[in-house]
Amino acid sequence: MPGNPLETITAMDSLFMEFIKGSEKLVFDDGALPRKFKLLIALAFDAAHGAGEGVRSLANSAIKAGSNKQEISEALRVAYHLSGVGSLYTASMSLEGLF
């Protein structure tokens, strides 16, 4: 899915989307957990839920935040342990060519 997957919701309710953007900063900025760890958690959730575009986007963001291939691999181990092999299929297809 090219572009912003929330484009339709943005057109319908821009005020709500501004609220969501504000909460993203609160959620993903460095705090007790570094940004890269938070992105790895989100990546594992997206893998578990079959959101391939999210896996790829979050992997790229995590790399920019300082994560490496091993950290991403370990986050996917957690996704697999809690959600099963489907999370690995999603992640494998989504990360193709990234490393």
Image (cartoon, helix red, strand yellow):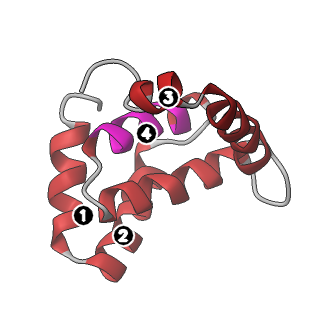
Nearest to the eye among marks 3 and 2: give it.
3
Q: Above or below — where is 4 with respect to 37?
A: above
Q: If you read the primary sequence from the N terminus, does the residue marked by circle 4 or circle 3 appear first? A: 3
Q: Secondary structure at mark 4?
A: helix
Nearest to the eye among marks 3 and 1: give it.
3
- Provide residue 26's location: percent of width, then percent of height: 79, 46
Which one is nearer the viewer's eye here, 70 or 14? 14
Q: Give neighbour class at mark 2: few <14, some 14-19, many 20+ (Cα, 10 Å).
A: many
- Is 39 magenta? The answer is no
Task: Report the disc number at residue 59.
Answer: 4
The residue that label 1 is drawn on is 87
Q: Quadrant of residue 99?
A: top left
The residue that label 2 is drawn on is 79
Q: Above or below — where is 65 with respect to 3?
A: below
Residue type indicated by callout 4: Ala
Nearest to the eye among marks 4 and 3: give it.
3
- Provide residue 66's location: percent of width, then percent of height: 61, 36
State how far apart marks 1 and 2 are (Cα): 6 Å
Badges 2 and 4: C-beta atoms under 8 Å apart? no
